[in-house]
Image (tube, grey):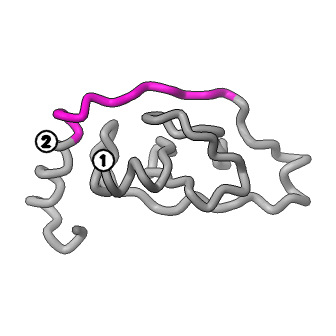
Amino acid sequence: MLEIRPNCEHCNKNLPNTSTEAMICSFECTYCKTCVIEIFENVCPNCTGNFVERPIRPLKMIEEYPASIKQVYKPKNLKSAKINSNQFKKIHPSKR
């Protein structure tokens, strides 16, 4: 089950369960759309995978399965992120 993390790991923007700005990779690294698109170019700086929109847990389920309250805030090295993005694009040219 997804943790539904509450913030962007890079800029610390709040991303509550109902946010349409939350993006995740397959390891559930969580970033806002701005960071994903403009900074990381849709390549996760942690695992080098791609991102998808995080689903919103229905309100009737959030009581029984609450979103995480643990904040992860680890701004990334932008030089390394750019290298990861460029390598991903070489391997997956159709995923731009």
| Residue at 46% from the left image edge and 44% from the top image edge | 27
- Which residue is at a point 72% across and 51% down the rendered structure image? 17
Membership of 71 in magenta stretch = yes
Looking at the picture, which amino acid does disc 2 mark?
A: Ile
Residue name at image x 12 percent, y 51 percent = 86
Query: Picture coordinates of residue 12 (x, y %)?
Result: 53, 33
Residue type pointed to by label 1? Ile
Q: Is residue 63 magenta?
A: no
Mark 1 neighbour class, 10 Å CA radius: few under 14, some 14 to 19, many 20 or more: some
- What is the residue that sits farthest to the left in this orientation? 90
User: From the viewer's perspective, is 67 left or right of 72?
Assistant: right
Tell me: residue 36, above or below residue 96. Answer: above
Q: Residues within 10 Å of mark 2 (few under 14, many from 20)?
A: some
Q: Magenta segment, which residues?
A: 70-81
Whole-angstrom CA distance, mark 2 to mark 1, is 12 Å
Please give the residue where the numbered disc 1 appears in the rendered image. Answer: 39
* Image disc number at residue 83: 2
- Quadrant showing the C terminus: bottom left
* Labels 2, 1: front one: 1
